[in-house]
Structure formats: structure tokens, C-alpha cells
């Protein structure tokens, strides 16, 4: 039986926090979806892009539940935006947010699917992005 908890912890410690790209090739299966493709390289592309915007971004595991071929991780992250983040130019501001990632593993213990949700709206607010609704949209339901 695979140790999905240990693999999930290693993904966060090695790939997300330490930038150890070689670990991604051990942990991520070729069919795992990522940024613009699949496999370790597509997963790394997402993390490279995020690290370019927030070089000191660090994730902390708040809670982790693993069972069978799946693991769920509730995490918190914080980092200073010194590079372009989507349409947002560098601000020098610290953004702190939380999210959850759900991982599914194959029989060899490699990640074949990742699904994440996070507080992106909070990140944008902390970076000073003004959210203006389009014309005709009101804040009340009708």
C-alpha cells in the first residue's frame, strides 16, 4: 500500500516550498494535469510562474487527511509579490491566503490528479487590486 500522506507532505516540502524540481519527476505521473499540459513539467511550470511572482512563497500544512489512493491538504501560504502576478505588476506587498488541494495517486504512489481551491480573491485584494463590477451589476439579488 502506498503512503499517500508521506507523498503529499513531500510534494509540499520539496516541490512547493524548496523548489526541488527533481522531486516532481518522482512524485508526479505523466498524465497529471498542470499548466498548459500534463506531467511533472506542466506542474513545475505552474510553480515556476508562481515563484517568479512570489519568490519567498511558503506553504504550511494546516491539516492533511489521507485514505487509500487519495489525500486532502488544507494549507496556508504567504509570500511577497516582487514579480508580475497575472495582470498585477510587482507591488512589494505580502499576500497571505489559504486553500485546499486534493490529490489522487496511482498504484506506484505517483500523483495522477490534483484539484485545488484557494482564496485568490483575497490575494488580489491584498495586492491592492480594485474590484469594480461591470456596468449593470448590483450587489443585491433581485
Image (spheres, grey):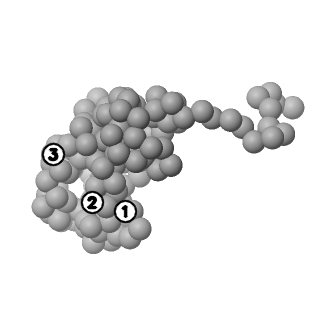
Q: Which residue is mark 3?
A: 18
Return the x and y of residue 75 as percentages of the image width and height: 32, 34
The disc, 2 or 3, on the residue closer to the chain's N-terminal end is 3
Judge left or right: residue 59 versus residue 7: right
Residue 141 in view here: yes
Of callouts 1 and 3, which one flags the residue occurring earlier in the amino acid sequence? Answer: 3
Q: Which residue is mark 1?
A: 34
Circle number at residue 44: 2
Which of discs 1 and 3 lies nearer the camera? The answer is 3
> What is the crowding at mark 1: few (fewer than 14 residues within 10 Å), some, or many (at least 20)?
some
Estimate the x, y position of residue 57 in percent, counting from the top left.
27, 38
* Residue at left offset 32%, top offset 34%: 80
The quadrant in which residue 46 appears is bottom left
In percent of width and height, residue 74 lies at: 34, 35
Q: Nearer the viewer, residue 45 or 39?
A: 45
Q: Is residue 43 left or right of residue 128?
A: left
Q: Quadrant of the N terminus?
A: bottom left
Pick whichever of labels 1 and 2 is earlier in the sequence. Answer: 1
Question: Up-down: is 29 above or below 79?
Answer: below
Rendered view: 130 above or below 85:
above
Disc 1 on helix, strand or loop?
A: strand
> Residue 3 at what x, y percent from top left?
16, 50
Q: CA distance from mark 1 to mark 2?
A: 8 Å
Q: Residues within 10 Å of mark 2 (few under 14, many from 20)?
A: many
Amino acid at each position: 500500500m502506498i503512503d499517500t500522506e508521506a507523498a503529499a507532505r513531500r510534494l509540499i516540502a520539496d516541490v512547493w516550498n524548496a523548489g526541488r524540481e527533481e522531486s516532481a519527476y518522482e512524485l508526479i505521473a505523466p498524465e497529471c494535469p498542470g499548466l498548459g499540459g500534463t506531467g511533472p513539467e506542466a506542474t513545475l511550470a505552474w510553480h515556476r510562474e508562481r515563484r517568479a511572482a512570489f519568490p519567498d512563497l511558503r506553504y504550511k500544512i494546516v491539516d492533511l487527511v489521507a485514505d487509500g489512493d487519495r489525500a486532502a491538504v488544507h494549507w496556508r501560504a504567504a509570500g511577497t509579490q516582487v514579480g508580475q502576478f497575472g495582470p498585477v505588476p510587482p507591488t512589494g506587498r505580502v499576500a497571505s491566503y489559504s486553500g485546499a488541494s486534493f490529490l489522487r495517486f496511482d498504484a506506484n504512489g505517483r500523483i495522477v490528479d490534483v484539484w485545488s481551491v484557494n482564496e485568490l480573491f483575497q490575494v488580489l485584494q491584498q495586492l491592492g487590486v480594485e474590484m469594480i463590477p461591470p456596468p449593470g451589476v448590483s450587489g443585491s439579488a433581485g
